């Protein structure tokens, strides 16, 4: 209900997953357009395209993937006043050449007319790629990695935070904490994919 | 852009210097009529040229590695409702989109590895505008890395198979003081190379 984790049981009342119950996230809710298993090696179509987008890297996929995010967005976007992509540290930007989340957010902003702000939330220190880490390490890895450089642009805003993949939610949770600390009225999370750990 | 160049620009933004951050390139203003539609501004900095073009009605993608400069450009774009899209990228590792632009402006920046991607990023008949430092700039005492300066005639030679509409080089008086520059406006041939 909060983080959007799928449940195996056929319970028809909405409820929170165990992770959200023990460690409530800072964001209101998180939703994704598609689900795959993080350990899936059978080449889930979206997973393989996203990997190509991020690790080749292939920026030409930004437009179709952004279009997919906008088209299949499971959230009503009219309630938000600003779209904020998860920022990259300069070190990672130099490697990839671009911020994959910024391009997805751009497509969504174009489609919805909601303002895009890719410059107020910044990553102030480089972090190890989350994909290399276990769940508990991930939280520690991104702690205090983000800052709002321009709080006046965030204060009072209803933020839709955009990233490519949600796995444990550690990154978007830390971003949300920082946005709320800077006065955001609300933060929800939208990702293209949700990678389930089991 | 080299790391030291990024730091130099960040310092310039912090110090509030007008040089290279406010008034658009004189060569661009002189040939603005040729630059319209969807435009790419590489190494856009704080957006002086991108803002100028967007105010004239162009839709401008402004690329730069510095957040500080882009933040400024975004603020102007937002206040004035311009079609200006600032994007943080590292041009050394970013691949430009293909057949997207009517014009590309490359001002006070040199990355030779972009010359071929410029050709692919333009629509047929698109134009490129350069206003970039020459090697002679070193003689004016300002410390600059030779690798980011053009040799005399180099730009014209590199674009020899384009339709060169304007080419000039020499010493010019600019908002940053006297500068040795190569300036070119060239049109992409309609047919792609073999």
Image: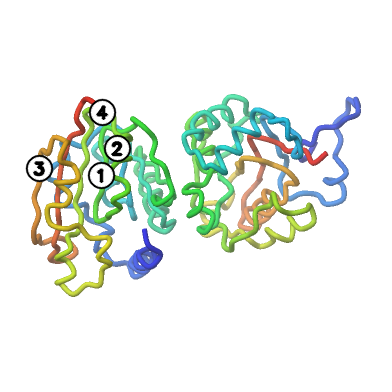
Disc nearest the viewer among 4 and 1: 4
Is residue A158 rendered to the left or right of residue B176? right
How far apart marks 4 and 1 lie (CA) works out to: 25 Å
In what element is the residue under mark 1? Answer: strand
Tell me, yes or no, whether the two marked residues, 4 and 1, touch with CB atoms within 8 Å: no
How far apart marks 4 and 3 lie (CA) works out to: 25 Å
Q: Are marks 2 and 1 on the same chain?
A: yes
Place of residue B20 in the rendered image (x, y in percent of width and height, measured from the top left): 25, 60
Residue that carries the numbered disc 3 in the rendered image? B166
Q: Chain of mark 2?
A: B
Name the colour scheme: rainbow
Q: Quadrant of the N terminus of chain A?
A: top right
Place of residue A102 in the rendered image (x, y in percent of width and height, measured from the top left): 52, 43
How far apart marks 2 and 3 lie (CA) works out to: 19 Å
Residue that carries the numbered disc 1 in the rendered image? B105
The disc label shown at residue B194, or none: 4
Place of residue A36 in the rendered image (x, y in percent of width and height, measured from the top left): 73, 32
How far apart marks 2 and 1 lie (CA) works out to: 8 Å
Tag 2: Cα neighbours inside 10 Å, few (<14), some, or many (≥20)? many
Q: Earlier in the sequence, mark 2 or mark 1?
A: 2
Tell me, yes or no, whether the two marked residues, 2 and 1, touch with CB atoms within 8 Å: yes
In what element is the residue under mark 4? Answer: loop
Tag 3: Cα neighbours inside 10 Å, few (<14), some, or many (≥20)? few
Residue that carries the numbered disc 2 in the rendered image? B39
Q: Earlier in the sequence, mark 2 or mark 4?
A: 2
Which residue sits at x=83%, y=39%?
A: A198
In what element is the residue under mark 3? Answer: strand
Q: Chain of mark 3?
A: B
How far apart marks 2 and 4 lie (CA) works out to: 26 Å
């Amino acid at each position: 209900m909060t983080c959007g984790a799928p449940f195996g049981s056929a319970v028809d009342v909405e409820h929170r997953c165990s992770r959200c119950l023990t460690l409530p996230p800072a964001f209101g809710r998180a939703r994704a357009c598609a689900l795959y298993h993080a350990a899936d090696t059978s080449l889930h179509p979206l997973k393989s395209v996203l990997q190509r987008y991020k690790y080749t890297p292939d920026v030409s996929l930004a437009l179709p993937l952004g279009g997919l995010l906008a088209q299949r967005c499971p959230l009503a976007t009219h309630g938000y006043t600003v779209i904020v992509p998860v920022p990259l540290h300069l070190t990672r930007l130099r490697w990839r050449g671009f911020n994959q989340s910024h391009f997805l957010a751009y497509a969504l902003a174009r489609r919805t007319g909601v303002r895009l702000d890719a410059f107020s939330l910044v990553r102030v220190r480089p972090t190890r790629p989350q994909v290399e880490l276990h769940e508990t390490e991930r939280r520690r890895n991104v702690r205090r990695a983000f800052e709002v450089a321009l709080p006046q642009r965030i204060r009072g805003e209803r933020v839709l935070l955009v990233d490519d993949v949600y796995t444990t939610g550690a990154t978007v949770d830390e971003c949300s904490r920082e946005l709320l600390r800077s006065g955001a009225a609300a933060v929800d999370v939208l990702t293209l994919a949700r990678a389930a750990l089991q | 852009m080299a790391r030291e160049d990024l730091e130099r620009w960040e310092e310039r933004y912090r110090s509030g210097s007008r040089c290279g951050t406010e008034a658009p390139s004189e060569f661009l203003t002189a040939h603005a009529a040729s630059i319209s539609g969807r435009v790419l501004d590489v190494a856009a900095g704080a957006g002086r040229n991108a803002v100028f073009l967007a105010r004239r009605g162009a839709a401008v993608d402004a690329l730069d590695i510095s957040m500080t400069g882009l933040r400024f450009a975004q603020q102007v774009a937002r206040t004035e409702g311009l079609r200006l899209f600032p994007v943080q990228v590292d041009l050394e590792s970013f691949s430009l989109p293909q057949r997207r632009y009517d014009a590309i402006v490359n001002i006070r920046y040199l990355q030779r590895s972009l010359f071929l991607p410029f050709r692919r990023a333009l629509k047929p008949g698109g134009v490129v505008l350069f206003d970039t430092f020459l090697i002679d700039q070193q003689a004016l005492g300002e410390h600059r890395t030779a690798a980011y300066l053009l040799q005399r005639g180099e730009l014209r030679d590199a674009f020899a198979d384009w339709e060169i509409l304007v080419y000039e080089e020499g010493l010019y008086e600019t908002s940053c003081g006297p500068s040795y520059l190569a300036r070119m406006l060239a049109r992409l041939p309609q047919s792609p190379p073999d």
